[in-house]
Amino acid sequence: MKTRRIHFELDEAAELIQNGQLVAVPTETVYGLAGNGLDQKAVESIYEVKGRPAVKPLSLMVPGPKAMPLYCDPIPKAAVDLAEKFWPGPLTIVLKAREIVPEIVRAGGDTVGLRCPDHPMTLDLLRYTGLPFAAPSANPSGEPSPKTAEDVLQYFDGKISAVVDGGPCGIGKESTLLDMSVTPYRILRQGALSREEIADALVDRMTILGITGGSGSGKTTALNAIRSRGALVLDCDAIYHELLQSDAELISGLQEAFPGCVLDGRVDRGLLAAAVFSDPEALEALNRLTHPRVTARVRELLREHAMSGGALAAVDAVELFAGGIDQVCDLTIAVTASVETRVQRIMHRDGISRERALARIQAQKPDSYYSDRCDVTLTNNEDEHRFLSKFIDILKENKLWTN
């Protein structure tokens, strides 16, 4: 058998695949060895030609996200989100397979990887045939992946029917293999897409609320309601205190900026507070050090939540805007209350005197600071039940809460 080199005759390549033959095809990463992924004999030929161990499953090339339900079930929304973001592109998504996917493709397992290659000729070929392609890299197992049609011919000339010459591959690195059949999602093979890129794409598709307001305003009621929906709730004040103890880079920066505030490698919060209490420039210097670190940690925790299948999060931050955390939020909510209401709540919650509670409030920003910057302001002077009802109504109006 002589291997044909095809440049434009995609109908010929399609006919070969439809008839159970093997055709090497270009992608944006490397060339793939394609056969009808629903044809047992064609798949057997792929294993044989490559010398691929039978215990290693194959992925299926598909023309786009709409093909996912044909071969997989269930399909989490996050998988669709990633497909819409990165397809065509170097991401293979592993999901539970439907019975239509041959056992040999799955190597006896219950999952299958789906991939949509970013190459116009192969996409046209997928659409033309109406078939998914089982298409591992077009090289003998253990050999370097081919980046050109010539590379393929050096491996398989006379062993496969044809190679579609789509020019050199742009990336030259295989797709990232992401298992979304389980949570947390797992990267099975690191390829052209990084874990951070994938996690950031999932974070971008999450619903994230930013909730802010002064002490005693009653934010906890709203946050508990969100938490009951499976949301990740991030307390930026708690994150700040955690970083003061654990972030070596931040501690080093504080030691340099505020000499004497770091003792034996630990930040003395009392000394640090005293250093910035009545010095606006010192406070600004502290914020320049801490805000980026808190924001980075929030982003890191959001990525972890997204990679665990999370779709909802809330960020509780007095300095929601100063640190730029508001930029990841879909909706920002200011929770305000009268001074007297806040005083009574703080006294009851913290067991302190009226004078201390009032002094704490007076040291904070006025309600207008939060109201002027947030999308929505909720006044919380009534009982918890009525406030919660108003809060849920706001979320429903913004399509962020479903029954």
Image: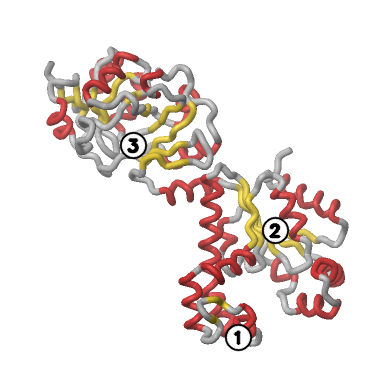
Q: Examine the image and state in which quarter residue 166 appears.
A: top left
* Above-or-below relation of 248 to 256: above
Q: Helix or strand or loop: what does disc 3 sit on? A: loop
Is residue 214 left or right of 128 when viewed as pictured?
right
Quadrant in which the N terminus appears: top left
Q: Examine the image and state in which quarter residue 191 appears.
A: top left
Disc 3 marks which residue?
118
| Residue at 55% across, 34% down | 76
Q: Give the farthest residue toward the front.
A: 264
Where in the figure is residue 390, as x and y percent of width and height?
A: 80, 51
| Residue at 54% across, 28% down | 74
Where in the figure is residue 36, as x and y percent of width and height?
A: 33, 19
| Residue at 60% across, 85% down | 275
Q: Does residue 203 appear anywhere in the picture?
A: yes
- Residue type at mark 2 is Ile
Which mark is on residue 275?
A: 1
Q: CA distance from mark 2 to mark 1?
A: 32 Å
Where in the figure is residue 200, as x and y percent of width and height?
A: 48, 50
Is residue 73 left or right of 333 when viewed as pictured?
left
Which mark is on residue 375?
A: none
- Residue type at mark 3 is Asp
**Tags 3 and 1 touching, CB below 8 Å:** no
Disc 2 marks which residue?
333
Q: For mark 2, does the 10 Å Cα neighbourhood hold few (<14), some (14 to 19), or many (20 or more) residues?
A: many
Q: Helix or strand or loop: what does disc 2 sit on? A: strand
* Above-or-below relation of 77 to 324: above
Q: CA distance from mark 3 to mark 1?
A: 56 Å
- Residue type at mark 1 is Ala
Q: Nearer the viewer, mark 3 or mark 1?
A: 1
